[in-house]
Amino acid sequence: MTKTTTKELGTLILALIGVGIVGYLVLQTLGGQGHAAFNTTNLGVHWGLPIVVYDYFLLTSTGLAMIAALAILFGSETFRPIVKRAAWLALAGLAGGVVVLMLELGHPLRALVAIPTSFAFESPLYWKAMTIGVYVLALLILIARMLKPDWDAKALRAHAIVILVLAMFITAAAGVVYGSNSFRPFWASGDIPVAFIFESLLGGLAFIYFFTYLAYAFDADAMPEGVKRLFNGALPGLFALAIFVHLLFVLARMVNGLYGNVEGLQVWQQMVSSPLFLAEIFIGLLLPLVLMLLAATRSRPWAQALAALLVMNALLISRYEYIIGGQLVPMFKGTWAPDLLSYMPSTTEWLLLLLAILVSNAINAFGELTLRLGRER
Amino acid sequence: MAKWGMVIDLDKCTGCQACTTACTMENDRMPGENWQDVLFYTEGTYPNVSMKWFPRPCMHCEHPSCVSVCPTKATYKDPNGGFVLVDWNKCIGCKYCQVACPYGVRFYMDERAVIQPDIRTVFPSNNDRLWDPPYKGPQDDPSRGVGIQPHGVVSKCTFCYHKVSKAPAGAVDLDEDIPELKEHVPACVRVCPPKARFFGDLDHPDSYVNKLIADKRGVRLKDETGNKPQVYYLSGGAAAAVPALRSMTGPDKA
């Protein structure tokens, strides 16, 4: 057994132990208290941190899939080292999110049958769920086709187009779920699906950077030449561009929210002064942007790994603020409900975030161990 | 077939909450699960402060967004009567309908109890329902969201489907003052002391509800959402008006 294999096996075992412990705690709590273990209420915050976590992992997954597909279509040999890892990470991330969603739903098993048989064509969630099924299948087949070390990118082009379309559709549908609620001005906007697509691309890039470094235990010297070339070549610029575009969308929504008088936008007044929002903008987005723009830092492994980690956290905050923020103004609840609701995730909800992270890492470690992600050349 | 609708005269409503209580008793709802509620608001700043109230059932919309968004078609529009109902056998508890309802009239009661002691533990159910009150109505139709719900589903006002759907064929106005129809009148309408609520067929040109809507210029709440409620409000200006804002507290909402 090589040193690398031992390390990957160790990561897998640790992640599985974590899944066991956290999964047990969550199931124990939910079994005893049900959804009373969550801090969501009928006052207005119906979707809490579990939905934030689910959407975060889902959008990261679609972002990774889009990157894998684009790399196959336009990346030539330069992007080859990240394609298989991106595709596998897309599955790993999605699995983490779906596990949390299943624990959040009132009837998760019923959902597996009721959604496909409902033909609820008017519902964005129906399209989202159904497309995710096809998307998983397409990703699995893609990975199977890349099992041979000398897989040919040209032969996978049609497959990559299918995955690209599916990933963009799922991401856009996720945007429609929120953006179509015209009576929730904090959410409602026609550009939300587009913003989601850019956000997921950014998430995908951040995950690629971070998990590639993680695969080599943050030892840049151990990375293959192809990965180094890519990480020091085109990728930092793309990463910076993705951060910039996401930042533009967030700041545009913020300015619109601060100047708008529509009932529901007052959430922005509270949000812009919150430490979480400031951390997201200044530490989570602007700092990585600077790191990826400066010639002195953009090619440094520590700067790339740090930027990726900061962006991953900023996107989670961004998702949290968007989903929760849209629910903070209660719908016709009277004086006994405050102007703006307050919501703080419960311990069980935080544990669900941890569970998603551990599940994704366990599956990713399994892939690193068995699929030799990005190591074929 | 009738398209049942409600008219609420805000000039007559005294905010007594008899409707809320009657709905809770009739439908065995839990504390905090106010299918029908009267919302109280304070308006203005001291010394020019006034208290207002606003009765708010489910609107049983003509184009309900809760129906459109449901990924399992658990929430549906009953073509026989125009009720918006939930099939608890299909509901997966995703709560998208709650998020998509502009009126905030849907409830997921598996969450933390709003009042202690938790009534679910005081009267626990042994048949997979959320609770088992000692006194409860005989009606039980999970496919229409009538009765006590099982775990993990969303509940909502049914317009007292179990009463209204059994009204004699051809009935146009379900008025508690008509002896042969009073058992088919929704609970909130039947108990209203100042008779501020009226219930009838919106599709019948001679119904009293249509006459009221026409004569007193009935309006629908948040009509701009396109949901087209089947609940109309009358307001002559003597009392509460249909609120333009969702949250009406605070000095800037005067």
Image (spheres, coloured by chain):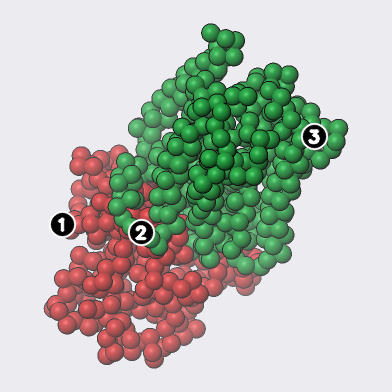
Q: Residue at image x 30%, y 46%?
A: A113
Residue nearer the viewer, B184 or A133: A133
> Could you tell me which secondary element the residue under label 3 belongs to?
loop
Chain letter matching colour red: B
Q: Residue at image x 20%, y 65%?
A: B162
Q: In the image, which disc is placed on residue B99?
A: none
In the figure, is residue A286 to the left or right of A32?
right
> Gap in Å between the C-alphas at discs 2 and 3?
47 Å
Q: Residues within 10 Å of mark 1 (few under 14, many from 20)?
A: few
> In the rendered image, is residue A17 in sight?
yes
> Could you tell me which secondary element the residue under label 1 belongs to?
loop
Chain letter matching colour green: A
- Identify the amino acid type marked 1: Pro
Task: Give percent across and percent down for residue B118.
Answer: 35, 42
Residue at mark 1: B138
Residue nearer the viewer, A15 or A263: A15
In the figure, is residue B129 to the left or right of A187?
left
Residue at mark 2: A120
Q: Residue at image x 38%, y 34%?
A: A30
Q: Are marks 2 and 3 on the same chain?
A: yes
Q: In the image, which disc is placed on residue A298?
A: 3
To which chain does the residue with label 1 belong? B
To which chain does the residue with label 2 belong? A
For the residues bearing labels 1 and 3, Cβ distance under 8 angstroms: no
- Identify the amino acid type marked 2: Ala
Q: Are marks 1 and 3 on the same chain?
A: no
